[in-house]
């Protein structure tokens, strides 16, 4: 008997039948004597549908109203799930994020949770009631509705698990765990029994959308036992763990990719001190996040400078860079949206040399041109033409034997 937070994603609650199936699953756990808090996403496609409606009215929708709009998706699911539970004879109550006092800062559409008042939930649980909370949303100090960014229901679930000191937080989704890479891209991807927080954090920040990055940060910070499982089948799923892997651990644990970035290049920049600051300063001032950067050495006293930003920020970044280019007397500004960043991740990299060269050998054999490279202790990322995404992921997967169980 314990206290569990179960989160069900959009596909898992995508139809009335699926909501009823979730109700059966929750009831079974409750009948078993466990206290259950359920966090739900909007029904699949709903958040996109609402975003589309807003876009028909405003090119850049007002963030406050966007949050009011988007939060309705989760509210629909929570009430339907409670009705399904009540039909099964359970006691169940639904609450919006604001109602259970998930207090956030006021950065609309990407708010951060500041604190949660767990009293109401605990009181309900003690009375034998199943509590269903709308994911992805909270309320700022002034009572305005806020949302936590795409995929934010994961973070609601982990934050509630931390606040309630739950025994485990289960993220139920449409795959039965975390795989070596996205099984939609590489059908030979293998489910991992466990993955370290450090690796999961890298995977999430490098584009693996199975868990929102903040949910992994939260779980790491507050020591929440986090497990990813399937809504549709039984199984142990994948445990996100602190445990360091065995010595014979695979060299890399997974491959992540990110299709959301775009590349900007400014050519013919005078090669003088301060140039990089003049180029990137105004971009940072506009609150645009820069990811990878390269500067080429040229021998005619000018240099080329390339960096990547989120695709949504490309137009704004290009406008800024064009004006910088004029003031610096640079030659040209070009952009490329057809890129993808592919990364290999693994704590095994720390103790093994030659992983980068092995990765580059795979690209050489497949004739894939590498445009940018960046490395850190447990990851190597490259930017390539997006048309090579599948080929790159599958070739790396095979070359690093990710389809095989690592030797024990
Ligand atoms: P939910 O709607 O339940 O939140 P998401 O779509 O956010 O589900 O996340 C599940 C999806 O993540 C899977 O359908 C899968 O295609 C994708 N995915 C990407 N990388 C991985 C990975 N390494 N392991 C498992 N799933 C992955
Ligand atoms: N409904 C939101 C989204 O689609 C939040 C979530 O599902 O986690 O991003
Ligand atoms: Mg998700």
Image (cartoon, helix red, strand yellow):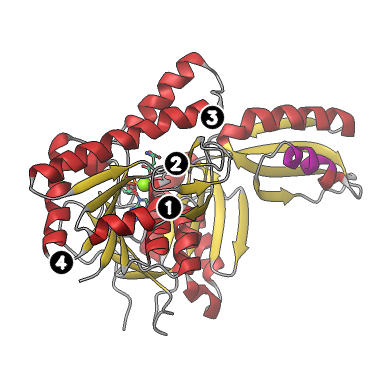
In this view, 143 is above or below 128: above
- Identify the mark at residue 244; answer none if there is no mark: none
Please tell me in which quadrant of the rendered image residue 407 appears.
bottom left
Near mark 2 (Cα within 10 A), the count class, few <14, some 14-19 or many ≥20, is few
Badge 1 or badge 3: first in the primary sequence: 3
Q: What's the CA distance linking mark 3 and mark 2? A: 15 Å
Question: Which residue lies under the disc numbered 3?
Answer: 64
Residue 285 in view in this figure:
yes
* Name of the residue lying farthest toward the left: 88
Is residue 231 rendered to the left or right of residue 261? left
Of labels 1 and 4, the one closer to you: 4
Q: What's the CA distance linking mark 1 and mark 3? A: 20 Å
Question: Which residue lies under the disc numbered 2?
Answer: 150
C-beta proximity under 8 Å, tags 3 and 4: no
Near mark 1 (Cα within 10 A), the count class, few <14, some 14-19 or many ≥20, is many
C-beta proximity under 8 Å, tags 2 and 4: no
Quadrant containing the C terminus is bottom left
Query: Which quarter of the frame holds ligand 2?
Result: top left
Q: What's the CA distance linking mark 3 and mark 4? A: 41 Å
The answer to whether mark 2 is within 8 Å of ligand 2 is: yes
In this view, 126 is above or below 407: above
Question: Which residue lies under the disc numbered 1?
Answer: 155
**Magenta-tinted stretch:** 278-285
Of labels 3 and 4, the one closer to you: 4
**Image position, residue 225 (x, y; %):** 36, 69
Callout 1: SS: helix
Residue appearing at x 37%, y 63% in the figure: 164
Question: Which residue lies under the disc numbered 4?
Answer: 33
Residue appearing at x 42%, y 22% in the figure: 52
Quadrant containing the N terminus is bottom left
Residue 394 in view in this figure:
no
* Name of the residue lying farthest toward the top: 57
């Amino acid at each position: 008997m314990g206290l569990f937070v179960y989160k069900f994603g959009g596909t898992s609650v995508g139809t009335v039948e699926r909501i009823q199936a979730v109700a059966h699953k929750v009831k079974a756990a409750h009948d078993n004597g466990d206290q259950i808090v359920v966090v739900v996403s909007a029904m699949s496609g709903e958040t996109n549908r609402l975003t589309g409606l807003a876009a028909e009215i405003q090119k850049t929708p007002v963030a406050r109203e966007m949050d009011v709009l988007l939060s309705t998706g989760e509210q629909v699911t929570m009430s339907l799930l409670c009705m399904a539970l009540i039909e099964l004879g359970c006691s169940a109550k639904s609450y919006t994020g604001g109602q259970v006092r998930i207090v956030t800062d006021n950065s609309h559409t990407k708010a951060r949770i500041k604190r949660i008042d767990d009293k109401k939930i605990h009181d309900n649980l003690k009375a034998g009631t199943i509590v269903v909370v709308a994911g992805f949303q909270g309320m700022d100090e002034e009572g305005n509705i806020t949302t936590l960014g795409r995929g934010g229901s994961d973070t609601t679930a982990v934050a509630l698990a931390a606040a309630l000191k739950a025994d485990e937080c289960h993220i139920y989704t449409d795959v039965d765990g975390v795989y070596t890479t996205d099984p939609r891209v590489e059908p030979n991807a293998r489910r991992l029994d466990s993955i370290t927080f450090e690796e999961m954090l890298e995977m999430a920040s490098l584009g693996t959308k199975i868990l929102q990055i903040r949910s992994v940060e939260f779980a790491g910070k507050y020591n929440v036992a986090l497990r990813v499982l399937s809504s549709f089948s039984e199984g142990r799923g994948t445990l996100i763990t602190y445990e360091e892997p065995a010595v014979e651990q695979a060299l890399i644990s997974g491959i992540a990719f990110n299709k959301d970035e775009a590349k900007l290049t400014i050519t013919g920049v005078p090669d003088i001190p301060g140039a990089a600051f003049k180029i990137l300063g105004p971009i940072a001032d506009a609150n645009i996040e820069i990811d990878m950067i390269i500067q080429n050495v040229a021998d005619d006293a000018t240099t080329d400078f390339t960096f990547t930003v989120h695709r949504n920020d490309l137009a704004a970044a290009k406008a800024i860079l064009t004006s910088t280019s004029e003031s610096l007397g640079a030659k040209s500004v070009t952009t490329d949206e057809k890129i993808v960043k592919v990364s290999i991740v693994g704590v095994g990299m720390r103790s093994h040399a030659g992983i980068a060269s092995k990765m580059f050998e795979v690209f050489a054999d497949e004739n894939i041109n590498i445009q940018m490279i960046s490395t850190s202790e447990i990851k190597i990322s490259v930017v390539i033409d997006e048309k090579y995404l599948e080929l790159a992921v599958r070739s790396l997967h095979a070359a690093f034997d990710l389809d095989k169980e690592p030797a024990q």
